Each structure stands twice: as structure tokens, then as C-alpha cells.
Image: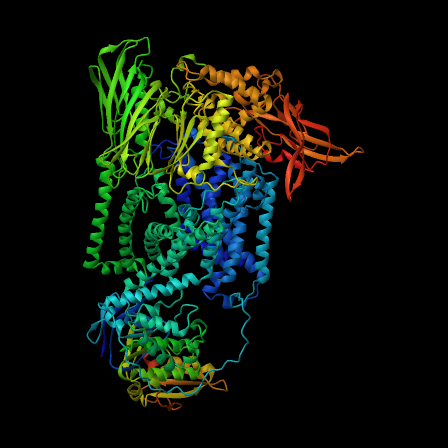
Amino acid sequence: MFSTIFFHELKYWLKKPAFYIYMAIFFALALFISATTAGFFDSITATTGSSRIVNSPSGVTNLFNGLTIFIFFLFPSIVGVSVYRDYKSEMHTILYSYPFSKGNYLFAKFFSSILIVTCIVLVIGIAMFIGFRLPGTNAEIVTAFDFKSYFDAYWVFILPNILLFGAIVFAVVTFTRNIAAGFITVILILFVQGVTESLLSDPDSRYLAGLLDPFGAAASDYYTRYWTVSEQNELHIPIKELILYNRLLWLGVASLVFGLVYKFFQFSQNALSFSLFKKAKGERATKRNFGGIIRINLPKVNFDYSILQNLKTTWKLSNVDFKYIAKSWPFICIVLVGLIIVLIALADVGNPYSTQSYPKTWRMLRGGGAFVVAINICTFLYAGMLVNRSKTNRINGLIDVTPIPNWSLFLSKFIAIIKMQILLLAVIMVAGILFQIYKGYFDFEVGLYIKELFGLKLINYVIWAFLALAVQTLIRSPYLGLFVLIVLSIGIPLLSLAGVEQSIFKYNEGPGFGYNDMNGYGDSLDRYLLYKGYWLLAGLMLLIVTALFWVRGLPHSFKERLFIAKSRFKASVAITLLVLLVGFFTLGYSIFKETNIDNVRYSSKELEKLRVDWEKTYKTFENYAQPRIISVKTDMNIFPKERNFEASGEYVMVNKTNEIIDSIFLSHNGYPSKFEFNKANVIVLEDTIYDFDIYQLKQALLPGDTLKLHFTVENEPNTLINNNSPVVRNGTFINNKALFPSLGYSGGRELTDNKTRKTYDLPPNDLKPHPSDSTALGNTYISNDSDWIDFETTVSTSEDQIAIAPGYLQKEWTEDGRRYFHYKMDSKILNFYAFNSAEYEVKRDKWKDVSLEIYYHKGHEYNLERMMRGMKASLEYNTENFSPYQHKQLRIVEFPSGGFAQSFPNTIPFGGDTGFIADIDDSEDGGIDYTYAITVHEVAHQWFAHQVIGADVLGATMMSESMSEYVSLKVLEKELGKAQMRKFLKKALDDYLTQRTFESKRESALMYNDGQQYVHYQKGSLVLYAVSDYIGEKVLNNALKTYVEKVRFQDAPYTTSIDMVNHIKAVTPDSLQYIIKDMFETITLYDNRILDVSSSEMDNGKYKVDIEFNVSKYRNDEKGKRFYSEEGRDSITYLAEGKETPLVSVKLEDYIDIGIFTEDDLDGKKKERILYLKKHKITEINNKISIIVDEKPTEVGVDPFNILIDTRSDDNRQKL
Amino acid sequence: MKLVITNLTKTYKNGVKAIDNLNLEIGTGMFGLLGPNGAGKSSLMRTIATLQSPDSGSIMFGDIDVLEDKMALRKILGYLPQSFGVYPKMSAEDLLDYFAALKGVSSKADRQVLVKEVLEITNLYDVRKKHVAGYSGGMKQRFGIAQLLLNNPKLIIVDEPTAGLDPAERHRFLNVLREVGTNCTVIFSTHIVEDVKELCNDMAILNGGRILKQTTPSHARKELIGKIWTKIVERDDLEQNETVYNVLSSNYNEDNTLNIRVFADEQPDADFITSEPQLDDVYFIALKQDEPVLS
């Protein structure tokens, strides 16, 4: 019986066009994505350059798994429907009386549909295989076909997932007899998966997360999380214990679900129903069987067929449809779960050390982003449900013959969808307000909620609703329609990858909008609304398509529908369509004209070629001698309301070389500018594409000669579509590099990926010269046309704003309704400055004779004290340990948003969303006080960048970023104590290890780093902190002090990382010289772990602690390949009992912390106390030691504070 | 008002000619459309009810060109399809209110009065708060009538309404229909000859998409007086009789003999006795004449 049903089911599917449509869609999708990642479209879009192999085992697994997630959306209509179909066709009334067993029936139904799904999966695999190898893909990033990658991905991840989700959907649809419920279940599972993922994102819960992720991705992440690029490219995902446990667990759940289906399924006529209330008492029911001759006298009523009445009816109909959606329990589930999801997203629950910002309404609105997908899917799904509702319920025969016009019918569906969207958007508002109340924050800004949710965001969803209604009307099969819509909504933005880059060609695409406290929506709204208006016109055209193809009655073929559509295409329709079309094209063309014709628009391919040509044309001038700027005087006029600027300035330049300079290479930007030298010259080249001009001086500049350049720069007027100026209404922040000209060729535009460069016949690029190259030390890494400059500026702005630039305020005055500020610097600074202008409040304080100021946005008073403390602490630490502060003033200046702060001479622009609104919990369990940490870091830059500045060679950022971050850690340590540092270090470690896995070019050792943030911030701070731990803070700082004194404010040749490391090396004892090599010169990673600990009380009341632990370390080359020995074969190995592969390590002569801790009970709170902490010399991988401590220990650790870079930081400690 | 159908043709995608150059005129009163399963009754009724477009031909109701101005007809049309469903979880009262709105009853008060009245007419008032989806077959059919009445229709089309109803329900249904149909056009399709006999003042027999005969029930019977003959034959003799006589129908008697009815202008055989013509005979004769002649 099993095989009869099984093969019947298969035959059914094989005959169904939907099966082939699904396969075709998946084939196309997989082909497109795999070919795109493999660089198929490189000829029309930017080159896919990377050191990453796209079809590496992890690449295949990720893509294969990712694409299979889409199949889950097909489950309701393939797996779920297998039993449901018998009900729907009322086959069950006959079938269920036949003599086959429940088991045969269910298994045959389930496995046949699983087989069908598997066929589609197979198609994905084949399409990926072909896609990676299509002619035209980039052979450099595709490796040979590896069967095991596909095989593992399929057997370990995809098949169990299909069985699990198949069983769940099968159960839900079989019991509810409702396909929509199956869909919502899929969405809910994806939601729940997302929630558990974020709940368990904290590094300590990763094992649990790995076990509980139904997709198994977190389990494989557990092993592969920190894989370097080379490892990702080469290694197969290890099918180790956690992955197996995870798979077994979820297969168990799948069997359980299926078992429950088996147990509760009955061959019965009625769907299982759940009722919260007891069944009403049964009553014998009889009906009247006699009589029935009556007079029919229908009351006289008014019939009204006017448009107004039809509109009223439309509204009434939409209410009926809306009620249907809102009352269906799948939808209610979405709303409730959505509420929970948004709340969880807002609370960032899984991240115990994260510090949240105050729950400003704009942040709540951003948190609602977690709900976007749900709103879209509900729109797509319920559009299908409503369009087909009368057909599904077979009531269409009654409705379609009533005198209601078609437009009223489909418009009512459309309105119902919009009402649903409004309801869903209201969920975000409710969640946001609930969260704000929970946080005790009562400035709800309801107006902002309403404006953004029911205005700005709603438009976006309405435009999707137009498309959904049209597609569902054309397709008339809600689940196929849903699937097509999901593919469209995901696929449309991806068109960029195929070279369709402009938003006007992609449905509902366009610029977004952003909000911040200082500048509100800024100018982003106009542009957003313009594009939405454009797409709204397209949506209205789709509504006409819907109207033409709206099914009324019973057409029998698509041909007939076409015929009907043609007959409906009357003059009035044609005119409306024409008007919309004209509007659409006019608007589209005016956008196109503005972005493509009036202003040159470059595709990413063209931009890439421009960079190539720039290098090919002008690199020859790189080493051409140029004068150096020694003084800058500027006038900067900011017009906040008009968002314009007008600037002028004068550079004084000196020929500091021994050569005669005959030509000046002036590199500027696209702003309308004028340049005038004070010496006679001829312009020999004016390149308007690269904005690179060459002026030949009539009289060459002799060594020591001075030249002046006077320039003016302003912006072109802003338009609705193009913002031509960096000035904003409130909170302008512009630095000089974005506005003012510079001298000479700049290598910053060169392509960096060597594989891409090869395709353009460019030689490999080494980014920057090695620090040992003594000829490359002429420039700082901040500027290539100047050393230290004199600086003076006058900034003007509107009357209600304050304008700030580096320097001391000389004079402030108001003239013609504008405010002027004259700033002048009294000491030399780098050629790096910024202008800020906003409606500021000011807070002032003093540290010794340095005046401290914070310019902030009114309302952002929360953390001003903290910033002041941070400024003082940093000034204190740096002055005490390194050198005096060079200025008499220090200012923090708020700018609207961006999530960063940047240090300029005596002035620190600080993002308003970065530290000003952080809601910091000062208790020990509280999150990281990043406002304070950032403040200390940025102030430290006044030393490390603005006093000590590295030459423009590899590793230069170690002397600025790593040092500032180190100072920040040290100041925090002073404030909070050593024990509290572990959370900072662990976070830095996790960030370093995670971010390096995304490296696309190379990772170099700290002192030769390419400027990646994860190296110079995270690794740099870890390394310097560890060095201070090993050789002592005082010793390290003294060495650094000597170094700072030697190099501060030096002229070329500038200092390098080698110089700094040599200073540290000089004070490092011989026994610890290895740390210099491990930490600065190479990429060395430890794998330290406690294997076993035990403690026993001795007769004298002391405790003996026996510890077994492993210490091993390895090195990575720049691609992340592991190696264990430098030269020869000096690596060491250890084979643990019962293991097959030995542990290998670089030769060890290392000193590693062994710590023993106890817990004190302080007011009911456990507080850790160190019983023992000492560095032990380790020469073997496996070690057993015994230590005697005075008190009962509770926890033991090897490198317990995570001072070393360790790939697994959670096994360094073990509780007793 | 008269319904005039001329040269109506409809061919389905699968090649079946459901309506084949059909011409028909229907006046006020009850009109019975009789035909076997698959004759094209539903196709014809759906076409008249504006649910389906014919390939060619025209339909006029009074001065309404039904195919061109569907809305005009819908305003005065009451249609009850052969089978229909309803939205789940909606009570009869709510659903009827919904239909009343669809049919253009603008005021809420009007709708309430109207709905109450049709509920009472169809004897559904007591169960008006119950979900229609849970109604029994008869109740659902009465609900169908209730919704049909809402716009006080001038043209009523009911497609096989009595199939599956118990005798009491069937009578009640026919009575209501009769009551409504006194001063409007009611087209009523069925394959149950009895229904037509009891109810209709005009009728047509449809098969293979063509009208085989249009007549009135009494006239049709009158035509056949003296032409219907019956005799009792053994089961084994049936085939032989069928080859010789024009056998219209045959039914078993209790003793396993058969009673055959034969159509002939004169007494075919001495064994035959004359019989009162039934409407069934009219029906079978029409069908018989339409049967393809086997050569």
C-alpha cells in the first residue's frame, strides 16, 4: 500500500507544472548567485576580487544552506499540502474508508513530498556547480570541484533540516488543514531561530547556541568561527561532536513531531480543533418539516449604485477582509511573536557587556527593523489569500454576479492589506513604547512614531502591496505567488550585482532616510519621498494591470483572461494608464537626467577603470619633488539653512628639497574651485575627470624658495536629488581633506586587490612600503604634502549656531546676521583639521591650566560628566607617563551621527550617537563604559598622532591607534581594577578573532599592519596590555616615554614601528624576548586550556590544587595558514592518551599566568578574589602542576585574564 | 421582460462544445431547463448570469444586452449556483448584510430590515447567528435563496437547486421559488423531471449544448396522448424488445419482470396497453431523437 500511495504522489507532482516552475526558479536563483559570486558579471560591474575561494567547502556549505532556506517557504505547499490535498478535493471521504494503515498513508505522503523537495535541492546543487564554472567567471577565485563539500552540506545540514521542517510543517498543515498556518510556522521558526541566536550570542553561551540552532549553523560556527581565510578556503567543516549532537537532537525532534502526527492523526472527516472552552452541551436538533407556504413581500429599500456608494461599500468590504486577516490565528502569532522579537532586538539581551543607548524614539524605530521581513511576507501572503479568497471559499459564484464594480472588489483587498500593514507597524510602535516604559524613559515622541511608521515606512510597504496584488492576481495561486514575490523582493536589490545599479530601474528601490537628534531627517526625506513617489506611480500602473486581469466569473484559460483584459482596456483606462506612464517616465527621466546627464554618473565598473587609469596615467609623478605646505589660512563660510559653503584659503609652501621644482601637481576635488599662485605659471594639464592639474612655474622654485597658493572652493547648488555639499542644517562636520586641494599624486585611489590588478595588467600592490625602507619615510601617514603647519581660520555660520575649528578663539563677532569665529593655533599642527557648526550648548571645566569644553546638542547632557572625567584622566595619564600636552585647551564637539569620534588638534568631533546618549550602568555587572573609553582614546591621540606620528609605511597605526587604545585600557584599569579588565580583553579578543576571518587581502603582524582596525585597535591594545603585564607598566611606559621624547614633533624622516618596538625590546629581559617576536613581529596565537583540576584540603588547613593544562601556540602567515616552526623542525608535539592526532606547537619557553581564585560573599553578591597568580615557565604542551593555597579555591585558570591571544578563550578557566 | 438568447456558442479549452448555437426565448414565469448531467445547463446558466463569456451569440434581457452591459443585468439578477461555499466563521446575518451591501443596499437600516425579511422567508431567522459554514445542505440552499432575494431580482437563475434535498426541504424550496417567480423570470435547471412538472409553465430540454425541445409541461404531455405504450416483459427479452421498439424507459417490477414504455404512434403490439403520458416520456423522447444514429 505504501508504494501505491508513494508513487501516486510522485506521479502527481511530476505532472504538475508548479514542480517544474519551482525547479526552474531555484535553478535560476542558484545559478545567478553562484555565478555572481564567482565573478560572472565582472565585465559589467566591479571586479570580484578577493583572496576568498567562492566554492571552498565553507563557501559551498553557506550558499547551499542559504538557498535551501528558501525551500522552507515551499514546504507548506509541497509537504504540508500532501495530506491536506485529500481533504480539499474531498478525496478523504472515500480514501479514509479504504483498507490501508495510517502508517502507510502518512509515511508515503511524507516521504514522497520530501523526495520532491530533495529533487529541488538537487537542482540547487547542480546549478551551483554550473554557476561557479560558467564561462566568464573568475578562475582565480574558483577551485576544483570538490564532491565532499556538496555531500557534507547535503547529508549533515540540508537533509536533516528538510526532515525537521518538513515534519513540523506536515504536522501543522495536516492538523489545521490550513496552508497559511504552515507558512506562518516557517516564518515563526525562522524568527525563533533568530531570537535564540541573538539571545545566545554571548561567547560563553556558544556551545549551547550550537546545540540549539535547528539549522545546525551555530554548531559548525562553534568550530569554524575563527577560521582564517586560508582555513576557510581549504578545510572541510569538521563533523565533530557538537555538530553531531545538534543533528541528532533535531532529528530526534523531527521524529518526535512525526510520531505525534502518527499518534494523533485519525482517518476522520473533521479537522482537529482546539478550543479553550468546554464544548457546549449537546442538544438534539430537529428542524421544521412542515409548512412553508408564505407570502413574500420584500420591504422597499433603496438601491444605490453610485460611485460614492461603491466607495463606501469598498471600505466595508475591506473591513470584512481585514477582520479575516486579523482574526486568523497565524496572523495573531506573527503579531505576538513580532512584538517579542522587536522587544528582544531592542533589549539586545544576548549581549551582557553591551552598553545600550537611551531608548530614544528613533532608536526604537530602528529596532523595529527586525520586523521588516515579517511585514513584507504578510503582505505577499495575505495579498494572495485575499485575491483568491472568494474562489477558495467557492463563494465567487455569489459575489461575482452582484452589481459591485471590479474596482471595488480589488480596491477593498488592497485597502485591507494596507490596514494589515498599519496594524503590523503599530506593533513596532507598541513594542517601542513598552520598551521605553520598561526603561523608565517617558519622552515617547508619539509624533515621530506616527510620522515614520504610518507615513514614511508605510509608503514603502504600500508600494510592495501594489506589486503583491498584481502578481497574485496574475498568478492566482497564492503560494506560487508568494514564492515569486519573495524571490522578487530578494532578487531586485541583487540586480546591482549584475550591473543594474541605478535605483530607478529597480522596483521600490531608492535612497533611504536617516534620523538623528541633532539634524532630524536632514535632507534625506525629500529624496526618499521623490523616489517613493516615482514608485507609487509604478504601483498605480500595477493596480491598473490588476484591474485588467482581475478575475470576475469563471474564465477558462489565460488566453481568455487576456481577451477579457483587452476588452476592459477602454479609453478611460488607456488614458489613466497613459497619464501615469507619462508621470512615471517624466519623474524617472528627470531623476535620470539629473544623475546621469547633468552630472556624470559612474558605474562601479567605470569607477574601477578610473582608478586603474589614474594609476597608469599619474603614478609616474609620484616621486616628483613638490614643495611642502607650511602654513594654512582659511575663511570658511557655512550656510546651514541653505546647506552651502563658500571657502577660500591660502597655502604657504616651501621647497624643502635639494632639487629645483618646476611644476606643481595640484590634486583637488569636483567642487567649483579657483586656484591662483603668487608666481607666474602656465597650466599644462587640467584633468577634469581626476581633478588633477599641473602648473608649470615660469621661474622654477629653488631649494628654500616660498610659493603661495590662493584658492576658493564652493559647492554647486543642492537639488532635490543631488546633495552637493557636506553642510547639514544642524551639525556640520567637514575636514580639510574633503574640501581643500593637496599636492602631488595620491596612492589612495589605487586598486589594492592583486587579483583584480592582474586583470588590468597592473603590478602587485604592496599597499605601503616596509618600515625598513629608509627612503619611504618622508611623509607622515596623515599627509603627503606637508609636515607641521601654522594654522589660522575664520569660520562663519548662521546666527543661531556656533562654528568650531582647531585653534584658539581670537575673536567672535556678528555681522549681517552671521556669526564669525576667528581661530588661531599657537603651535605647529599636522595638516589635518575640521570645521563644525551647530546649535550648541557648552559645558566648561578645567584640568590644571587646560580649559576643557564640550559642545553638545541640547538634551544630550547625560554623559557630559563622564566625558569630562575621561578628558582629565587621559590628560593625567599621558602627561604623567609620556610628555606634556601641547595645547592649552581641549574640546569635544558633537556631530549628529556616524558611530565614531575623531581627534583633531585640540578638538575632538564626537558622534552624537556614539557616547552622548549611552545609558551606562556603573555597577560591576554593567556594560562597558564606552563613552569614557572613547574619550580617553581620542584624547590620547593628542599625543599619539598629534605628537608622535608615524611615517607613511606599514605599521604606522601602531603608534597612533594601538597606543591610544592601550592608554584607554590602562586608564580603565586604574579606574576599575585589574579583575574588571577581563571583560574588555575578552571583547577585544573576540572582536579581533572574528574580524580577521573577514580579511580579504592579508593580515600582517602588528608592527607591519596594513591599517586594519582589528589589528591596530583590538590586537594592538591586547598586545600592549600584555607587554605591560609581562615587563611591567612602569618599565613599558618609561621605554615609550624615551621614544616619545625622541620623536615627538619630528620632521622627516618620520618614525616607524621598528623604532618603537626597539625601544620596548631594549627594556625587555632576555627570558621574555620571545614575546616581542610573538606579539609584534609575527601573528602568534595560543591555544591554552585547563584539562583537569582538583583540590584537597591538607592537614594544616591549606589546600593543594592539582592542575593539568595544555599550552600550545601556532603562527599564521598573512593568508592565515598555520605553521609551527620557523626554520628547521623545532616544533614540539604531544599525543594525548586515546587521541590519534598529536597536538603541535611552536617551541615553548613561555611564561604563562596560572591563577587560583576564591569567591567572597559580599552582601549576597559573589566577588572573585585572587588566591594565587603567577607566571610559570612552560616548555611542554601538556603540564601537570600542584600549588598550595591558603584558602578553599573555587576556580582555576591558565592565562585566566585572557591576556594572551587565544583562539578559545572559554576553556581557560575551570570551576572546582 | 423576455430573455432572448440567439446563436449562443461556447467551446471549452478541452474541445467540448458546451453550448452549440443555441436559441431560446424565455418569458415571465417559471422556466424549467431540463437536461441530463453534462448537457450544458450549468454552462448556459453561468453564461446568462454573466460569469462566463460565450464565444459568440447574444443574450438580451428586456432591453439589456447582457454580454455588453453586465452590470445592468447584475442589478436585477438573482443567481444561485449549483454549489457554492461561504466564508467561514461568518453568521448568516453578517453574510447577508455583506451581500446586501454588494448588491447596492446603501443604508444600514435598510439592510437590517431586508436581511430580517429574507431570513424569515427562508425560515433561517432562528439560526441567523450561526455560522453558515456549519449549515446542513437544506439550510445552506435556503440561505442561497435568501441572498438571491436581496436585490429584489427580475431575473432569477437557479441551477439544480433541489439536488440532495429531503422531501420537506425540496417542497419548501420550490414553494418559495414559486412565490418569488410570480412576476419575474425564473430559470430553473434540473435533471429531475418531477420538479419541472410541479412548477414550470414553460420548459426546454437541453442536451449536448442544444435545445432539443421547448414546450410547456402540459402541452408536451398532451401531444403524446395515445402514443405511449407499456408492457411487461421478462428480463431476458429486454434486448430484443429494444431492437424492435422505441423503448423510452424500463423499470423492474417486484417479480423481476420489467415494465417497458414505448413511444409509437400506433399500438406496436397487442401486448402493449396505452398509458398516460408522463413528462419523463417527453424528456426521453427528446433525448432519444438526439442520440447519434448507430449505423
Name the residue: 62% across, 32% down: A1200
Name the residue: 62% across, 19% down: A1130
Count of marks overlaid on the render: 0
Residue A1009 image point, x, y percent: 47, 23
A167 up-or-down from A405: above or below = above
Horizontal relation, residue A579 to residue A125: left or right: left
Horizontal relation, residue A43 to residue A1044: left or right: left
A1067 up-or-down from B127: above or below = above
Horizontal relation, residue A1087 to residue B229: left or right: right
Please identify the quadrant where the C terminus of chain A is shown: top right
Among the 4 quarters of the image, the one containing residue A588:
top left
Residue A575 image point, x, y percent: 19, 55
Q: Nearer the viewer, residue B85 or A612?
A: A612
Residue B214 image point, x, y percent: 27, 80
- Residue extending farthest to the right is A1099
Residue A922 image point, x, y percent: 53, 40
